[in-house]
Image (spheres, rainbow, N blue to C red):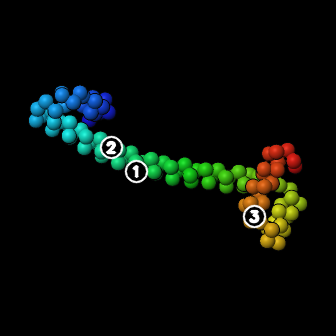
Amino acid sequence: MSDLMLLGVLSMPYDMAMDGEISRFQFHDRAQQAVARIKADAVRIAELEAELAEAKANKVGADRFAHVRNLNPVQFTHLWELNIAGKRAFDDLIDADIAKHESGEA
């Protein structure tokens, strides 16, 4: 059933929806359809939220990759040496370097 029909049946005035056995059956059937739709929508929303989180993570990774590609050898070596010395994780060092460049400090 279309959303318009579903909303129409669920929006019927109480007296009309409960008028007879057939209308009560129709109302109950549409309510069950709405329940199924809400459950399916909840699953789809969870899937889309997971896809969005993955896309955001991939964008961060892509931004880091692009930044590293633009570093000169001296800059890259400096970050790498800080990482090897255990100062910070390499991704954190890159993120800090990106932030430094975006704020104009670099």
Outermost residue to the bottom? 85
Outermost residue to the left? 21
Q: Residues within 10 Å of mark 2 (few under 14, many from 20)?
A: few
- Numbered label tally: 3
Question: How far is disc 1 from disc 2 in space, using C-alphas?
Answer: 10 Å
Q: Which residue is mark 2?
A: 37
Residue 70 in view here: no
For the point 78% across and 60% down, the residue is 93
Residue 90 bears which disc, if any? 3
Percent position of residue 54, x then y: 56, 53
For the point 40% across and 50% down, the residue is 43
- Closer to the chain start, of discs 1 and 3, is 1
Which of 24/81 is in front? 24
Residue 42 in view here: yes
The answer to whether residue 94 is left or right of residue 74 is left
Which of 61/106 is in front? 106
Percent position of residue 25, x then y: 15, 38
- Closer to the chain start, of discs 1 and 2, is 2
The quarter of the picture where residue 69 lies is bottom right
Percent position of residue 44, x then y: 42, 48
Q: Secondary structure at mark 3?
A: helix
Quadrant of the drawing holding the N terminus:
top left
Outermost residue to the front? 15
- Closer to the chain start, of discs 3 and 2, is 2
Q: Which residue is mark 1?
A: 43
For the point 64% across and 50% down, the residue is 59
Q: Secondary structure at mark 2?
A: helix
Tell me the amino acid under the disc marked 3.
Answer: Phe
Q: In this picture, is 20 found above or below 54?
A: above
Which of 10/65 is in front? 10
